Amino acid sequence: MTLAAGPATTVAASLDTGDTAWLLAATALVLLMTPGLALFYGGMVRTKSVLNMLMMSFVSIALVTVVWLAVGYSLVFGDDHADSGVGALIGGLEHAGMAGLGPDSVQGTVPTLLFATFQLTFAIITAALVSGAVADRTKFGAWLVFVPLWALLVYVPVAHWVWGPGGWILEDLGALDFAGGLPVEIVSGASGLALCLVLGPRLGFKKDAMRPHNLPMVMLGAGLLWFGWFGFNAGSALGANGLAAAAFLNTLAAGCTGLLGWLFVEQRRDGHPTTLGSASGAVAGLVAITPSCGSVSLLGALVVGLAAGAVCSYAVGWKFRFDYDDSLDVVGVHLVGGVIGTLLIGVFATETMTGGAEGLLYGGGFGQLGRQLVAVLAVGAYAFSMTYGVARLIDRVVGLRADEEHEQTGLDLTVHAETAYDHGVLGHGAPVSSSVSSTVQKARPQG
């Protein structure tokens, strides 16, 4: 978002119907990204845990919405109370329960309730993104506890720092982030890394083949993500204007070069350009352009996407070298891609887009690059350490890791008493116990 959100007004004359119509559409587009992510992730796991993966995304919609409406929005976009001793770190509770935000309240040129809903969709998908790092092995009940705690303690503070009134990254540091490289991409990636370290690797990690079970589903999910990303980035202009159009085009361009960059690496390294690589490359390019789409020119967007596609194609293999099981490459794509896109603002930012700040290649020196680096390090360190602490606490109290028997059999049957497919589910892992066999019988269609 281009400006910190100041106090909402009630001046109906400031409402712009064109801006409102665009933000309504953008909000729906961003919400659609979470079901798209569910399909993207669901296709990447094995057949025995498809539904569980879908459920982790869908339940995040409900959990984060409740937290956001209760206190999340107010803590992010409420006035910063510097005299409380936590100035620039968190907002106030004046809008808890959406208090004071009626249908006539206006934020800029759009209804405040619409602005709040648009921001909610960002919080939702960030939580859902984290689930990809711990696919196949997380207790569903523990996930229900983790998501609201994590949203309050990790996402909300960072979002305030970057976008809220008085947030130190925005107003004191002067780092730029147009649409969420810091609070969405870097936070989800760093949090995913912490969570998968607490949980440990999947059974059979680096021994068993854990290939995506449904690549058409992956491609469909990637397509929905790309579609929704136009609302994510262009919607962050908060109006139907030229900046939204530029962000829209930059988003398309970076997704394309990200896809091509990943395929180029695959061809040279492996001899085969893959469908999974094309989907992952497009997502990597879209991740990287998220913070920079409102700061760089079209040429900059092409380079940002290409760099992310190429680098992330290597980064997804780091988990095997450093022995952390990031199941669906949240670290390799979202953390690394988010870092690339956020840092390259300091190289490719143009005054035409930013209205002031310029990157290294446009005569701005190293100042903006340094500010971007400080923001990346601060947000990454905070998200990792706080998530690690929350995960450890939940693991000690209720346990994060699914039972070994459930993991071997598959979480679809053992947790949800359902299967995604009629056949081929039970061929994975250890023999089925009598208790699980009973669940299977109940889950099978009768007749």
Image (cartoon, rainbow, N blue to C red):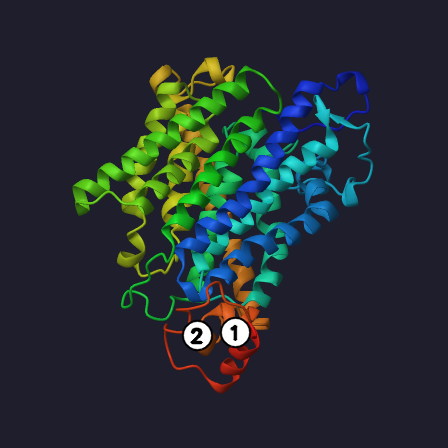
In percent of width and height, residue 260 lies at 29, 33
In percent of width and height, residue 147 lies at 59, 56
Whole-number angstrom distance, CA of label 2 to CA of label 1: 7 Å
Give the vertical position of 42 relative to 114 (above or below). below
Residue count near mark 2 (Cα–Cα under 10 Å), binned few <14, some 14–19, many ≥20: many
Q: Is residue 239 left or right of residue 431?
A: right
Q: Furthest residue to the front?
A: 447
**Residue at 36% across, 43% down:** 280
For the C terminus, which image quadrant?
A: bottom right
**Residue at 73% across, 41% down:** 92
Residue type pointed to by label 2: Thr
In percent of width and height, residue 207 lies at 27, 68
The answer to whether marks 2 and 1 mark residues whose Cβ atoms lie closer than 8 Å is: yes
Q: Nearer the viewer, residue 314 or 183?
A: 314
Q: Which mark is residue 409?
A: 2
Secondary-structure class at tag 1: helix
In percent of width and height, residue 16 lies at 71, 18
Residue type pointed to by label 1: Thr
Q: Is residue 110 left or right of residue 48?
A: right
Residue count near mark 1 (Cα–Cα under 10 Å), binned few <14, some 14–19, many ≥20: many
Q: Which mark is residue 414?
A: 1
Give the vertical position of 206 relative to 126 (above or below). below
**Occupied quadrant, residue 374:** top left
Q: Which mark is residue 10?
A: none
For the N terminus, which image quadrant?
A: top right
Q: Is residue 151 visible?
A: yes
Secondary-structure class at tag 2: helix
Q: Nearer the viewer, residue 144 or 166?
A: 144
Q: Is residue 294 visible?
A: no
